[in-house]
Amino acid sequence: MIKEMLTGNAAAAWGVRLAEVDYVPAYPITPQTEIIEMLARWISNGDVDTKFVTLDSEHSMITAAGAASATGVRVFTATSSQGLLYGFEMLYTVAGWRVPLVMVNVSRALSSPITLEPDHNDILAARDAGFLQIHCETCQEVLDSVLIAYRLAEDERVLLPVLINMDGFHLSFTREPVEVPDREQVVRFLPPYRPKHAFFKASQPMAQGTAVIGGSGYSYFKYQMHFASMGALDVYREVSEEFGRLFGRSYNTTEGYMIDDAEYILIMTNSFSTLGKAAVKRAREKGVKAGLLRLRLLRPFPELGIKEAIRKAKAVAIVDQNISVGKGGILYSEISSVMYNEKERPLLLSFIGGLGGKTISSEEFEFIFDRMIEAVDTGVGKVPYLLYTEMEWKEMEKLKNVAGKGNKNYSNCRGETHNITEHGKE
Amino acid sequence: MNITTIKSIKDIPQEENLSPGTPTCAGCGGLLSLRHCLKVLGEKIVVVNAAGCFTLLAVYPFTPFKSSWLYTAMACAPAGAQGIRDALDILIRKGRLDSKENLKVVVLTGDGVAYDIGLASTSGALYRNLDFYYICSDNEAYGNTGFQSSGATPFASKTGTTPIGRISPTGLELSKKNLFEIWRSHTPPYLATISPAHPVDLINKFKKAEQYKGPKLFINLSPCPAGWVTDPSHSAKFARLAVDTGIWALKEAIYGEVKHTVVPKSFKPVEEYLKGQGRFAHLFKPVRQEETLKRIQEMVDQYWDNVCSRESRKR
Ligand code: SF4
């Protein structure tokens, strides 16, 4: 075992190297390129015995990855943002093939306007495809998740592909100390891939992805995927426990931070959770019984873990770094649906922030806690709050003026916007 | 390498690798050729399919193939072929799969895929010199969705999206893309056009292709009774007329060098091919569209004038 300063991308590449992946089909997109370039370097130096091939698009890349996986080799690939969307059709197809592909998505907001920095509309758009989803907060977690993902995907009770998510720039290019285990250590956890399920070979003709007509076959196979995904929660617990025994670190499907006696809970995912944790600490210092629940697995959705963790709280703020245009925060909807039939349940508040890499400042977190406390007093919470500071507002007005689109009289927009200017600072 | 070519229909291999009773339309010219292709390709293959008429060959839990099958999606069958080819090579090289278990990888698509939505992924596979067979069943329209114009639809054809009307009496105003030349510009080792009316030529081309590692491409002109509005029993006739009139040139290109394999001694007028097909009926009734017919004939003549001067110069 060695400890190295690795970026999130490098940590992902190390995970792949340790997993002794056979095949990496690739297509470049920022900010995932570093993962693929590192692997390409190792392959060209002979450090790993992996075949590397560049494809003509993400659509082709995911197809090649899935087809190779269906043929019986261990496969890895990575993408981001628009790339994930470009390959979207094949996410469903590959999941339907029931192959244990592992793919990293380095989250980046979606066009348009085009940007490079992260939010989670890309990965959350993929939530219904049949891929399991692991969302990471730290570089160490990225490396470990790659190993865990192969164990999970290749388990015969699961046989579904896995997406591992990390935030572009905020994690992909942040260096952190990461424990890189030895290969001997890893083999005990993740032995070489020797699939037992059906794959292509001459002596065993097999038809995969055939048409089904009439709907009953289709429903059957879709339910099978659903049951396999739900069942993956138990398999995940097993795998994570074993990982913990061998490496001294384990990851639950959700992670609670100062949550045991918390009355006011933030729900977050990915690297911005670190900001949330700092906010919780500050709130605690002020005497607010704050806590944070980080969702690590988003598919399958860890319903029980969420219910247990937040049931007793007074108010819960779901901080969505995504926007379902015309509806609001995606995770807010998902968590509300989990809690609705619970007798004991907290008030749920929805906040949308951190879009396109926009930071969530400490004032904004204060704003969130204030709204939770206020909601408990009044019994209602406004949904959703869009986090946007006064300063950001002014900055934007300046840019609009430069662009010739300045609107000195923007009361209309302001009236519609639940921004921190109006609700936090009066 | 010595390739055993066949001389007549009597020499066509007896074995069948495609069972009868498929859900394709009666008289499907694509299926006629596929049956012959599979005679040469054999059993040890995996068919990678993109959406099209042939997708319905494999309907759970049946397939008419003795071999394996993977349905991918419309745009990306060559990428699926890439994944399988690479995986098989890896497994064999690393000793995890006996080389006896090896498979030929065969992409099966229609023209909508080959000429339009799947062109990029095909170009990618050609560029990467992927060792695979690619068979395009070209019925000159999107057949499985009815019959809408594709990049393969010829000038003046009526389709669901190029209907005949007062404003557009001709049908499609554009000309068929030259997929052969698009593919040829990638200089694959083997590229050919085939026809269900010329099974001997077809089989010899597959046999020839076998000796090359890399992309081996085939475009089959597939009479389509449903879309061409012809009698199912006439498919072979129209396939033959396409060749005899010069509309469908049977040729091959080895590393880019073109040779015509069947050249009619004297060409029949294109009218003989166009007549009898519902998709061209508007060229004859209610009034003969002389200009259009002339233009089609000219396009064909021009092609063969070029070929003759080029190929005779070589001789
Ligand atoms: S629509 Fe045409 S190409 Fe398709 S199966 Fe029927 S005859 Fe064959």
Image (cartoon, grey):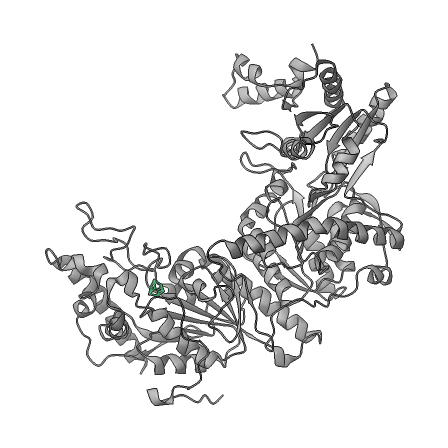
Report whether B178 appears left or right of B109. Answer: left
Residue located farthest toward the front when viewing the structure as drawn: A343
Residue B265: image quadrant is bottom left
Between B115 and B10, the residue placed more toward the observer is B10
Q: Eyeballing the image, is B20 above or below A69?
A: below
Residue at image point 17% right, 56% down: B282
Q: Quadrant of the C terminus of chain B?
A: bottom left
Report whether A221 appears left or right of B309. Answer: right
Residue located farthest toward the left when viewing the structure as drawn: B287
Rendered location of residue B248, percent (x, y): 29, 70
Q: Is residue A274 visible?
A: no
Residue at image point 56% right, 65% down: B82
Report whether A349 appears left or right of B181. Answer: right
Rendered location of residue B36, percent (x, y): 40, 78
Rendered location of residue A282, percent (x, y): 84, 23
Q: Eyeballing the image, is A353 above or below B13?
A: above
Between A160 and B157, the residue placed more toward the observer is A160
